[in-house]
Image (tube, grey):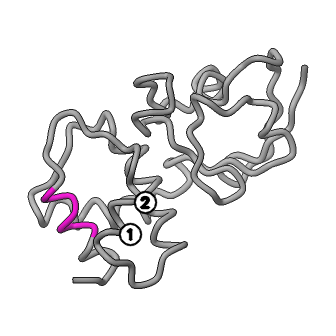
């Protein structure tokens, strides 16, 4: 079946099977920032925005994107670089495998939450797993990025 999607501001047509997941479709068509980790909606590596809201693309059927707007980290490079500078300044750099999904969640949080508490930040990040660092440096960077203490 054919679906039409706007990806990072560009109209694209995909040919999919009805049971294809969005992560598979996006990777098949060259959006390689989409990481696949658990395929169980547990790790957040595959996070993209669907009509401006973060979704786990490993558990979102591609057909749901028909007529919708999908945003990957390629579409938010400036914003991603801004947040990455906060990670670097706090010594919380990551290996890069989980970064695209984590950053997509952080950028969505910044749009959605104003002056969040630490608990709200942690709750929003629930389901984003980093296998190679702790979370203290990331939380420090995130709070500075969000402008909260």
Image: magenta residue range: 136-142
Judge by depth and name the residue closer to the eye, 87 or 64.
Answer: 64
Dot 1 corresponds to which residue? 120
Q: Assign a secondary structure to mark 1.
A: helix
Proximity of marks 2 and 1: CB atoms separated by less than 8 Å: yes
Q: Residue at x 39, y 35 (%)?
A: 43
Residue 62, picture quadrant: top right
Residue 49 lies, in percent from the top left, at 61, 51
Q: Is residue 98 part of the magenta span, yes or no?
A: no
Q: CA distance from mark 2 to mark 1?
A: 6 Å
Left or right: 120 with respect to 59?
Answer: left
Give the prevailing secondary structure in the magenta stretch. Answer: helix
Is 91 left, or right, of 119 in this rendering? left
Q: Is residue 29 left or right of residue 76?
A: right
Q: Is residue 112 above or below residue 134?
A: below
Q: Position of residue 56 (x, y in %)?
A: 56, 39
Where 84 sits versus 44, above or below? below
Callout 2: 10 Å neighbours few (<14), some, many (20+)?
Answer: some
**Residue that badge 2 annotates:** 124
């Amino acid at each position: 079946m054919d679906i039409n999607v706007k990806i990072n501001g560009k109209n694209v047509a995909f040919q999919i099977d009805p049971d294809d997941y969005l992560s598979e479709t996006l990777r098949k068509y060259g959006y390689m920032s989409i990481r696949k980790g658990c395929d169980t909606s547990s790790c957040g590596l595959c996070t993209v925005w669907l009509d401006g809201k973060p979704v786990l693309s490993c558990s979102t059927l591609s057909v749901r994107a028909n007529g919708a707007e999908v945003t990957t980290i390629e579409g938010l490079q400036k914003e991603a670089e801004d947040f990455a500078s906060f990670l670097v300044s706090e010594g919380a750099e990551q290996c890069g495998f989980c970064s695209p999904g984590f950053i997509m969640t952080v950028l969505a949080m910044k749009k959605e939450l104003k002056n969040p508490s630490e608990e709200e930040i942690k709750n929003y990040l629930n389901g984003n797993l980093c296998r190679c660092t702790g979370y203290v440096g990331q939380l420090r960077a995130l709070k500075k990025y969000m402008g909260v203490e």
